[in-house]
Image (cartoon, rainbow, N blue to C red):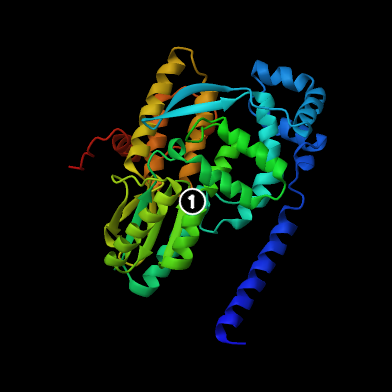
Amino acid sequence: MNSEQRRAARRKRREEKRARAKAERVKACTLETVADLNSLCKASKQAARGVMWKASTQRYMKDYLRNAVKSRQDLLEGRDICRGFIRFDLWERGKLRHISAVHFPERVVQKSLSQNALVPAIVPTLVSANSANIKGRGTDYALKLLKRHLADHWRRHGREGYILLGDFSDYFARIAHEPVKRQVADALLDPRVVALEHRLIDAQGEVGLGLGSEPNQICAVAHPNRIDHYVAEMLRPEAYGRYMDDFYLIHESKEYLQVCLLLIEHECAKLGIALNPRKTRVVKLSRGFTWLKKRIFYTETGHIVVKPCRDSITRERRKLKKMARMVADGVMTPEQVEQSYQSWRGGMAHLDAHRSVLAMDALYRSLFENLAGGLLNAAKPGRRFERNALAIAEGRQLKTAA
């Protein structure tokens, strides 16, 4: 046996091993599992969390067992479960987003499909650097991974080096259907489940996946998986990470990252993905950079600082002032304001934003002096500190002592 035959034999053994592992992983990802009454009832209760105030949710949950039986019959008999979309627009951080929400009975089926077929079949094929919409991961996981990558780079090269920041342009609206369908067909073995997911994809139109559907989120997370493996296994930068449509590569050479960018653009074209030229760039690590709305940079000693970007602080100040007017007009209650502010404050606890939080606390107290409980019952700082913190929150210059 020559070397070529040995390589072919090794390749065959690897492919057979992968096929056995895939069959074991997806053997329960069948239409019977998706249409199981226990699965549908569990999915209906999960889908109703937080939206029980809606009349459509109340109507469904009033007879959820009977509705689950009907959904099971529709799935097993191959009837179309698509009932159209409820389309509306949202402004999120100054960006217009088009939402295509499905009706509640279809949402229940989609949740069961996601939990019992798509997630078990697709998520194990994703790289560990993919952080979005996966249980046990998220923005905190993505930032911790980035900090670990930056710490490793500091130990090798110090502050010398570069990071390639990439962003997919208008990601959800431009996802081509054929690559997503091939990916779903490759991940699942039951043709009935594949046909069901293909019908849900075709219902979105000729191109793009709508926001507001759980299977669309999973497909969107997994769509650039080919690019993830290509970068991690072929280009092999010092570090790589991706959160939905934002990704980064770290390397000591700027020229190497520029070559990587050209190769990534070539791979993106195969999947129908376009990079945003305004947000995709190579940045020197010593200058700091912004990723996931966080400002990240090294200190002189190599400590990695993660701060909220200036826009996040400005947005929260404006939000507090607007909520103060809404409380005065009777549109909101003080308790709702406090819940909103505590949520923002909890998100800042993981960042290096102690001074910003204290300044925002001072603004919060100045706007809601009569609000009982919560922060107002905590010990207040000194009068001079509170005056200076309020000045910081409002963007004024501090008065120096005479």
Q: Position of residue 139 (x, y in %)?
A: 50, 48
Residue at 61% across, 33% down? 200
Which quadrant, please, contains the N terminus?
bottom right
Residue lying farthest to the bottom in this orientation:
1
Q: Mark 1 points at which residue?
A: 224
Q: Where, by quadrant of the figure, is residue 180 drawn?
A: top right
Decide: is 354 above or below 111. Answer: below
Q: Where, by quadrant of the figure, is residue 335 drawn?
A: top right
Residue at 20% across, 42% down? 400
Decide: is 153 above or below 291. Answer: below
Along the viewing direction, whichever of 25 and 182 lies nearer the viewer: 182
Along the viewing direction, whichever of 72 and 279 lies nearer the viewer: 72
Q: Is residue 375 left or right of residue 166?
A: right
Q: Is residue 308 left or right of residue 41?
A: left
Q: Is residue 249 left or right of residue 4?
A: left
Q: Is residue 307 visible?
A: yes
Along the viewing direction, whichever of 279 and 18 lies nearer the viewer: 18
Q: Where is residue 185 in the image (x, y as percent from the top left)?
A: 63, 48
Q: Where is residue 67 in the image (x, y as percent from the top left)?
A: 78, 24
Kindly identify the amino acid type of the residue bearing the numbered disc 1: Pro
Along the viewing direction, whichever of 336 and 60 lies nearer the viewer: 60
